[in-house]
Image (spheres, rainbow, N blue to C red):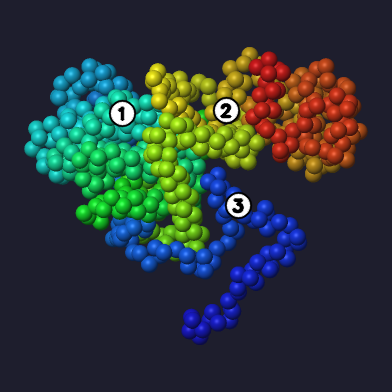
Amino acid sequence: MKDRDFFKAFPPVSTKAWEEKINADLKGADYTKKLIWKTNEGLSVKPYYRAEDLKKLGYLDVLPAAKPWVRGKKSGDNSWEIRQDIVVNDIEEANKKALEALNKGATSIGFVFNQSFDELKNKLFIRQEKFSRLLEDIYFECIDLNFEASDNPGFLLLLLEHEALNKKIDLNRIIGSVNIDPLGELTRTGNFALPEKETFSALAKTVKDTAKKVPDFSVVSVNGHLLHNSGSSIVEELGYSLSMGNEYLQRLTEEGVSVDDASRTIRFNFAVGTNYFMEIAKFRAARLLWSKIVEAYQPADDASTKMYIHSVTSDWNKTLYDPYVNLLRTTTESMAAILAGVDSHTVRPFDAHFRSSGAFPERVARNQQIVLKEEAYLDKIVDPAAGSYYIENLTDSIAEEAWKLFVETETAGGYTEAFKKGLVQDHIEATSQKRDMHIARRREVLLGTNQYPNSAEEMADQIEDEVYNEKITIKEDTIGRPLKQYRGASAFEKLRLATENSDKKPEVFLLTYGNPAMRKARATFSSGFFACAGFSITDNIGFDTVEAGIEAAKKQEADIVVVCSSDEEYANIVPVVYEQMKDQAIVVVAGAPACMDELKSKGIENFIHVKSNVLETLTAYQKALGI
């Protein structure tokens, strides 16, 4: 039988038939509430998609490396630059790290200067020879070379040009970027480094000079990761990043820069989170929308409508506790970015947010990308997501919502004006507050922090304060309130660190009694609940009598006694436990039994269950115990 004849045995099933079957199985339950997923982005994701869902999409016949670039800029393979970022505190050490990274698989280097320009100038770059030492033995005309500086990054560009001339390197061969981002400065600190008009005039001059001298070097960055790491949704990160990019185009062209030079000098630096398919769709939608924006400026060359995307693993979802889980997160994030066709990618070391990463974490971070390339072969196939009913529809949905936000921002006068009015902050802060609440209630899971924590783990002595409590200088004369950069786990980490730093770790005793299935389930739940605060937990296989459980709890000198049993048994046993233990420990009931009101009338006030605000509840217990 021919393959095509084989499938005749399976007649097509219509969408109507599928829906009828689903509704029958739901037995009257609300389809929308049960099966439609409402994302943080405000998207409604269906439980399944079919070929007919692709009919409304107008770009599906576009090949890779063709406008509007939704399928990427590459046609032969899916190669990307494996970038390692190196913090420059010491010139010799930074050069050594860069050479080691390049010799072990990196194809791109990012030198990051966290010190101010004055410190750089006075301490590191007193002479051009210091910069030469930084790049010694690095054939920077053969790699993607990037610089990030917190102050006056244009100074680094001048040093690079001078270095190239000294070494007789053709400036046309240098590829890379200097991270000049006035709008990012506004976002982080609340104001520009220079007066607004002067800021963009100076930027235009730098762009003009660079376009003439180093045409393939990007000097303008759109740092969308700042929005992501403020708790934004994917739509907000994309929509506002596009607005920043459009403002750079507008400001630069007004200063006499051609749209082709302006667009080619812009690099978009996006974060990538663990929402796997959504992130793939985000990058595809980003290229589509940027092409549309640049096209409106009527560039002379269609290639000017391409978007250069550098991605970096998220900081927002990384955790102090159970830090090796961060390796799993960054691997998932990297896969999403690479499959989506980014141009370059950085994996942040798993411990980078709480201490200065050593050789091992940096090596692992680099090797994560190399494994994805050399062993998973992710560099072989261009846009493997193409044609996926789900991802293509996600791409379209994200593009539609991000475009709405972009238009809304432009209507407000562009990114700067929207930021001055607080519109950007209001939007993102509303999302971040919702996400914080979801984490507090464990509707959004951070593994090892608010779900399945290791209560015995202690991390206080692993923290480097200047890294963990990174300070961002807020300008005194702000024109808009800065967006706070933070991590979603920080509130739970504060909770656990308070326990670690207290004189006595609270003892939680699980008094298990009665129905074996219910007591075990509730003991497991309670153990995970209190472990989120780093409390010491004593579990039990079950007591034959309530009195035996009470006696054991007293012997343990428990601070908190959690009664774990079935709803039916609570009405009788909880009052007994409460009367015997109320003067010695906090008595907690695991669950929300039907007899809750009756128990409350007897003075029992503490209940933990799946709807509890875990963060708020544990903070209250800490306070009651003097922590």
Q: Earlier in the sequence, mark 1 or mark 3?
A: 3
Question: Percent position (x, y) of residue 483?
Answer: 46, 30
Q: Give the secondary structure at mark 3.
A: strand
Q: Is residue 49 left or right of residue 127?
A: right
Identified by mark 1, the residue type is Glu
Percent from the top left, x then y, of residue 336? 44, 50
Q: Which residue is mark 3?
A: 37
Tell which tag, 1 or 3, sits nearer the viewer. Answer: 1
Location of residue 492 with respect to 109 vertically, above or below: above
* Residue 196 numbered tag: 1
Q: Between marks 1 and 2, how big is the CA–CA gap?
A: 36 Å
Amino acid type shown at disc 3:
Trp
Q: Which residue is mark 2?
A: 491
Looking at the image, which residue is at 85% across and 39% down? 594
Query: What kind of residue is marked 2?
Result: Ala
Badge 3: few (under 14), some or many (20 or more) residues near its Cα, within 10 Å?
some
Residue nearer the viewer, 533 or 596: 596
Q: What residue is rendered at 37% in x and 26% in y?
A: 191
Answer with left or right where residue 446 lies relative to residue 290: right
In the rendered image, residue 38, in percent from the top left (x then y), is placed at 59, 49
Evaluate if marks 3 and 2 touch, with contact meaning CB atoms under 8 Å apart: no
Residue 22 in which image quadrant: bottom right
User: Quadrant of the rendered structure where residue 250 is?
Assistant: top left
